[in-house]
Amino acid sequence: MVAMKESLQGKKILLAITGSISAYKAPLLVREFVKAGAEVRIVMTESAQKFVTPLALQNTSKNKVIIDMFDDSIQERGSWHIHLAQWCDCMVIAPCSATTLARIAHGFADNALTALVLALSDVPCYIFPAMDTDMWLHPATQNNCDIVRSFGYHIIEPAHGELASGLIGIGRMHEPTEIVCLIAQKLQTEKVRIPALKGKKVLITAGPTYERLDAVRFIGNFSSGKMGFALAEYARNNGAEVILISGPVALKASTTIHRIDVESAEQMFVAVCDNFPSVDIAIFAAAVADYTPLHPATHKMKKEHLGETLSVSLKQTQDSLAWAGKNKKHGQYIVGFALETENDLEQGKGKLKRKQCDMIVVNNALTKDSGFGSDNNTITIVKKNDDISPFPHLSKSECAKVIFESIINDYASNEEL
Ligand code: CTP
């Protein structure tokens, strides 16, 4: 019991209640979780309200109960289901009706509860089915259980005993104290993995920029955006809230990444200035044009007017990374990239200092199957005090992993960052 209290202390439980007669025990379940030190947020289906009132659940949990996914009062920040799914340490569905089990098995997101199940990423989901014996033993329900287990969710078989129908058999929901003990044990033994970047806001720039020469032409570069997108996906998969500022690329990002599409260095700079102040980590992986035409033509330039040769005056663009370095606040971590063709390390060290970064990721444009357009990269991480870590030829996803591991390591060894 003591161990139970300890493992639930401060834990965030997302409790889901469905339309089964045993839902009448839900307020007791909430009370047991709260007594053990957990914070409980509740989602219930429409039909659960036939068996227990939202008011009783709101009073016991001290939190608003979600029933309607389109309820105005939960739309404030948008994507309420994503925020709630990322907030919790685990989801507990008790009782879970045969219908909700079927919906989960088949990926429905047609009510607030099932939408939340689909939005869970790294946290465990414990399902306590409760129904009449025949419904439980029906092949449809058992198949659905198999499917749900294959997603990695935990199904806790119902108890045997007296059922609401008066029959005796398997199908009873476990008693609230048993459920709380079981969840406490699970959380203790399975040690819920807290995503390393949970609670962190990350900004990433990616891709090339296009600098318009006239209405149909631009100065650009061969960047594909793959490195920046790999970083964005890694951060998102590890719990971060991600803002991805991307130049023109042909890549798709996960919908939970806040993507801002830009074209030019100037637009990228504006987007960085708008967003950098609120982030914890900023990684500048974009290949930004250093110069842009001074007087881009608004119409298509014509050869007959230009003659044999063409000279274009260019002006320097704003350097987003250097601006961020100058405006960096306590606790912010900045990473730049340096794509070089010679003296890589010296160039990287120079950029680290000049642009006031915490880390520069150096890569060489001439290395085989690395850099622009490739799925792979060969990087060296350069930090202050000549801290240099070369890595072998890796996929860009693996590069993203080693870059973030190095950042997380710095955060862990210097909480003040
Ligand atoms: N960078 C930026 N904005 C710019 C130019 C560069 O944010 N206008 C960032 C890049 O995203 C990268 C880092 O600065 O993280 C280094 O870019 P790079 O082009 O290698 O360096 P430059 O300072 O432009 O120097 P050079 O091109 O002369 O090597």
Image: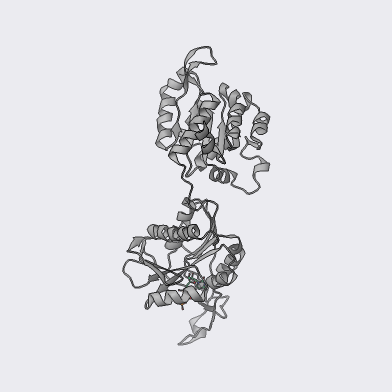
Residue 47 visible somewhere in the drawing = no
Q: Where is residue 223 drawn, in percent x and y?
A: 43, 68
Residue in the picture at 47% in, 75% down: 351
Which image quarter is the C terminus in? Answer: bottom right
Q: Is residue 21 above or below residue 313?
A: above
On the image, the x and y values in percent for residue 191 come to 45, 41
Q: Residue furthest left?
A: 368
Residue 105 % position (x, y)? 45, 33
Residue at (31%, 69%) from the top-left corner? 368
| Image-based side of 385 in relation to 393, left or right | right
Residue at the far front: name it. 2
Residue 147 lies in quadrant: top left
219 or 120, which is in the foreground?
A: 120
| Count of numbered marks | 0
Q: Residue furthest bottom?
A: 308
Residue occupying the point 46% across, 87% down: 309
Between 223 and 391, the one nearer to me in the picture: 391
- Front-most of 285 and 359? 359
Q: How is the image coloured?
A: one colour
On the image, the x and y values in percent for residue 71 come to 66, 39
Would you say residue 207 is visible in this rendering?
A: yes
